[in-house]
Amino acid sequence: MYERSLPQHFARSARPARSGARLWLPAVESPLVPSVLWRRIGQFLVDVVASALLPGAAMLLFVLLPTHPDGSIRSGPLTATITAGVIVVAVAILFWYWVLRPAEHDGRTWGMQVFGIRVVDVSGGRAGRRQLGIRWLLLAVDAFALGAIGLTAVLGSERRQRVGDRVAGTLVVRGRGPGLD
């Protein structure tokens, strides 16, 4: 059943990950010509912009701060409340973007949709919210130094997994629609 749902490029080069396991993965590719690497780089750039703009809209709450004519803020408690509100809204938006939305859209963020890739469980099934949450939390590690940590992890991994993928037990594969097409 699962083997039939694999894309043709997987079916031609599929091999078991470990003896006796039902997990089928693509054959190892050269680090210089991976089918998903360039898509992941493009997706990362799109998603960084999208996920920065969305919480950035929450920053508009700071416009509500009452200020003196010299620009200093009049109320410390109000400033603290609005700041806390902005942080909560920004984290909620980021959680929606990186965890809830992909969970409902076959493991795809907007950037993944644009570049035709998606996140799946290592068994090939849908990635769950828990797995997507782990990936999101570890995005801070992978995105460090302008993504150098994540890129190094992807290039050094047989399955092309970043740190978040390894810990969460997920893979990024090509696929646009429902199912792995």
Image: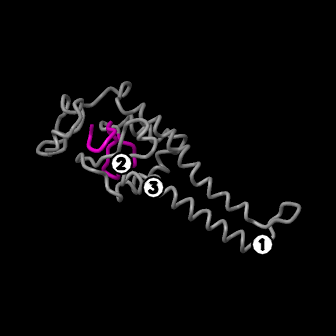
Q: Amino acid at mark 2?
A: Gly
* Closer to the camera in the image, 41 or 105: 105
How many numbered dots are placed on residues in this image? Answer: 3
Q: SS of the residue at dot 3? A: helix
The 10 Å Cα crowd at callout 3, few under 14, some 14 to 19, many 20 or more, is some
Q: Residue at x 20, y 29 (%)?
A: 13
Q: Amino acid at mark 3?
A: Leu
Image side of residue 130 versus residue 57, left or right: left
Q: Residue at x 79, y 67 (%)?
A: 66
Q: Percent position (x, y) of residue 132?
A: 38, 54
3D distance between C-alphas at marks 2 and 3? 16 Å
Q: Amino acid at mark 1?
A: Ser
Q: Residue at x 51, y 40 (%)?
A: 46
Labels 3 and 1: the sequence-earlier one: 1
Comparing labels 3 and 1, the label whose residue is closer to the camera? 1
Numbered mark located on residue 137 in the image: 3
Q: Which residue is mark 2?
A: 107
Q: Which residue is mark 1?
A: 75
